[in-house]
Amino acid sequence: MPVSTMIVVAESVWSRFNLVAYLQQIWWFEVDGVIKFPFPADSYTLSFRLHLGRFSKRLGRRVCSFEHTHGWGIKPVRFELFTTDGQQALCECCLDDTEHDEINGYHKRGCWIDYKVGEFIVTDSDPVTEVRFSMKQIDCTHSKGGLCVDSVFIIPSDLKDRKRRGVLK
């Protein structure tokens, strides 16, 4: 197995946070997390917010470089979630594929994309719900690079519908 090389550059890239991880060169990629929270009874969606390419400023304008972006279209990334009551979701996708994306057209590079992992249902806020989630691409046959990881979202599944109906302002 090749030696894993990872360069993580924390920098400002116009995300929700001042600093996010930018992965320039890696062989093995894994993000794991756990949250324990008394979620109100509802249906929830868990998503990762990712971006291919590196931001910079030129002449006062935001530009995105894809110089180090490679390897994300060869093998799929595996997204998973598990809850304490046995619910689970799994999906796989290539982050840099050329298939048509309804929101972003044919180009996923240069855009923040929310990758939906799956949904889970909370029927009672007591006991506290534990949610484990991960994003992995651990095939070491090729290197990967040029990925910004912004955040993981857990939101009520019908939040967009609520906002559209004017319930949330």
Image: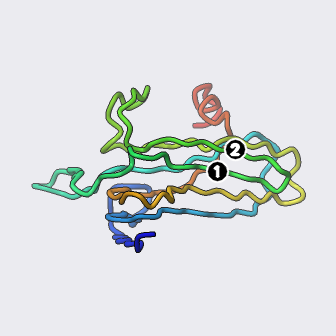
Residue 115, placed above or below residue 104: below
Q: Amino acid at mark 1?
A: Glu
Residue 98 occupies which quadrant of the picture? top left
Residue sitting nearer the eye, 118 or 63? 118
Pointer 2 or 1: first along the chain: 1
Residue sitting nearer the eye, 120 or 145? 145
Q: Which residue is mark 1?
A: 80
Mark 1 element type: strand
Identify the residue at image location x=68%, y=51%: 81
**Can you tell which mark lies on residue 11?**
none
Q: Which residue is mark 2?
A: 89
For residue 44, side relative to residue 107 (left or right): right
**Where is residue 163 shown, x and y percent of the image?**
59, 32
Mark 2 element type: strand
For the N terminus, the image quarter is: bottom left
**Where is residue 110 shown, x and y percent of the image?**
30, 44
The residue furthest left is 59
Residue 6, placed above or below residue 71: below
For the C terminus, the image quarter is: top right
Mark 2 crowd level (few <14, some 14–19, many ≥20, 10 Å Cα): some
Q: Tags 2 and 1 in contact by the CB under 8 Å rule? A: yes
